Amino acid sequence: MTKGMIFDIQRYSIHDGPGIRTTVFLKECPLRCAWCANPESWGSVPRLFHLQSRCIRCFSCAAAAKEGQVKAAPDGPIFDFGSCTGDDALRLAAACPAGALVVKGTPMAPEEVFRVIERDLPFYERSGGGVTLSGGEPLLQKDFAKELLTLCKEARISTAVETTGLVPWETFAELQGLVDLYLYDIKHLDPEVHKARTGRSNEQISENLKKLSATDAHIHVRTPVIPGFNDTPEALRAIADFLDALGIRERTLLPFHQYGSSKFRSCGLSYQMDSVPQMTPETLQHLAETSKFYQTGGNKS
Ligand code: SF4
Ligand code: SF4
């Protein structure tokens, strides 16, 4: 049995695939996108988050901390988040009487997660939903993902995986038959631009998509549209051309939002997208039209 490192399980989700779903969020991601909405996924160990709005400045955390982890300042505690991980994060959170310290990252066995998933079986059946593995990059925890997906398939629960595509091809090959739908992110086709804003080149991502599209996998590509990164007709048209060539028709543009902003601050990371306005549906629609991106939920040809 392989334990997975989970940072959230959301029931009744309607945005992570068809129907009503349970979305399981796994820790660790190979990318570091400035616009990330889930920085809880970053790193493989449990991480501490400080919810400022709940903090009553009692400084119990400082009393429970090791040297250098928490400084008691007049405006509230200042954390050295880099050293407040794993067991230290758990100890500090347990010392907080106000629920202002939250640890993201819990080791769970596949059976444990499955027991949460199976509670909503009637909803999946009625809505055409199921379970979605998300992250971060859920396939970085391949063995856990495989065991959990196997349990779902045995129970006839539909499965989806949200992926960055940045894992060895062997991982996709090993999961063949266990994933009913891949929600596959394509962010930019230029390797240099991709690397500059996400920390990694896109070459393996594109290669894996080519290989996956040559199998019978059901793929829906999603592209987050980020101002100053890929919000041009040329960048989006290049992606659409790539998908056309692979015969992938299902594709969606996702508008930039600032959902990650407060999370970045809560774990001591600096958020660089504060001055970037959220993208309106009208702007997104205009970009889709001018780039002839042709968003569709149709089947892969
Ligand atoms: S791939 Fe997703 S989870 Fe990973 S850093 Fe980018 S936005 Fe965040
Ligand atoms: S223990 Fe909790 S409420 Fe008290 S100062 Fe620390 S974070 Fe704030």
Image (cartoon, grey):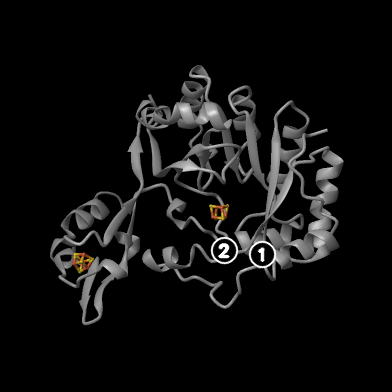
Tell me residue 301's x, y (percent).
83, 33
Residue ID at (37%, 25%): 111
176 up-or-down from 99: above or below:
above
Residue denoted by label 1: 226
Residue drawn 51% across and 27% down?
A: 149
Q: Which label was assigned to residue 81?
A: none
Q: In the image, 146: left or right of 251?
A: left
For residue 53, what is the image quadrant? bottom left
Are there few (<14), some (14-19), or many (20+) residues within 10 Å of tag 2? many
- Look at the picture and state if 124 lies above or below 270: above
The structure residue drawn at horizontal position 79% and vertical position 39%, both measured from the top left corner, is 248
From this viewpoint, which residue is outermost toward the top? 154
Residue 261 image position (x, y, % from top left): 48, 67
Q: Residue furthest bottom?
A: 74
Q: Secondary structure at mark 1?
A: loop
Q: Looking at numbered disc 2 in the image, what kind of residue is underneath it?
A: Trp
Q: Position of residue 104 (x, y in %)?
A: 35, 51
* Mark 2 CB lies closer than 8 A to ligand 1: yes
Which of the image's four quarters has the N terminus? top left
The answer to whether the residue labelled 2 contacts the one labelled 1, judged by CB atoms less than 8 Å apart, is yes
Q: Which residue is mark 2?
A: 35
**Which residue is more in the foreground, 158 or 33?**
158
Farthest residue toward the front?
Answer: 126
| Relative horizontal placement of residue 18, taking residue 101 as reference (left or right) | right
Picture layout, residue 24 above or below residue 199 = above
Instruction: Tell me the crowding category of disc 1: few under 14, some 14 to 19, or many 20 or more residues within 10 angstroms, Cα based.
Output: many
Q: Residue at x 82, y 51 (%)?
A: 294
Residue 12 position in % (x across, y down)? 46, 41
Query: Mark 2 falls on what kind of element?
Result: loop
Ligand 2 quadrant in view:
bottom left
Inter-mark Cα distance, 2 to 1? 8 Å
| Residue type at the position of mark 1 | Ile
